[in-house]
Image (cartoon, rainbow, N blue to C red):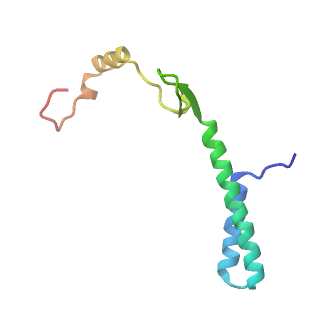
Amino acid sequence: MARKIKFEDALKQLEQLTEEIERGEIGLEESIAKYEQGMNLVNTCREILVEAEMRIQKLSATPDGRLTATDAPELNEPELNETELNETERANPDDNADSDSDFPA
C-alpha cells in the first residue's frame, strides 16, 4: 500500500510549485506540468480534509430514526443539562448579569 502524503507536506509542495510558476522562469510545457502536479496536490489536500472532517463527526439517530452527523463530543465544550445550568447560575449570579442591561438576569 502506498504511503499517503501528509497534509502539511502536500501544502508545502503546492506552495513551492506556485512560486516556481509565478516566477515565470520556466517554459510553457514545464509550467503546465507543474500546474498539473499542483492540481493533484490540491485534490490530495481536499481528500485529506474530507477524511479529517469525517473523523470528527459522529452519526446519531433522530427520534424519527433518521441519521444525522454531529460534531464529536470530545471536540466540543462539555454541555450542561438544565439542572446543572441552573445550579451554575445560582452559584455565580454575578457572572450571568449584564451590567449594561436594564433587565434582570
Q: Is residue 67 above or below residue 32?
A: above
Please state the horizontal and vertical placement of residue 30, each as a whole percent of the image. Answer: 77, 79
Q: Is residue 61 left or right of residue 79?
A: right
Q: Which quadrant is home to the N terminus? A: top right
**Quick one: which residue is furthest to the left in this view?**
102
Q: Is residue 24 above or below residue 101?
A: below
Count of marks placed on residues: 0
Q: Which quadrant is home to the C terminus? A: top left
Q: Is residue 98 left or right of residue 77?
A: left
Q: Is residue 48 above or below residue 61?
A: below
Q: Is residue 99 left or right of residue 95?
A: left
Q: Residue 38: name its quadrant.
A: bottom right
Question: Residue drawn 73% across and 69% down?
Answer: 36
Please state the horizontal and vertical placement of residue 13, each as a whole percent of the image. Answer: 72, 64
Of 46 and 91, the residue lying toward us: 46
Question: Residue drawn 63% across and 48% down?
Answer: 49
Question: Residue drawn 12% across and 34% down?
Answer: 102
Question: Residue drawn 37% across and 16% down?
Answer: 84
Please state the horizontal and vertical placement of residue 27, each as a whole percent of the image. Answer: 75, 85
Q: Is residue 56 above or below residue 29?
A: above
Of 105 and 64, the residue lying toward us: 64
Q: Is residue 26 left or right of residue 77?
A: right
Please state the horizontal and vertical placement of residue 3, each as a whole percent of the image. Answer: 83, 48
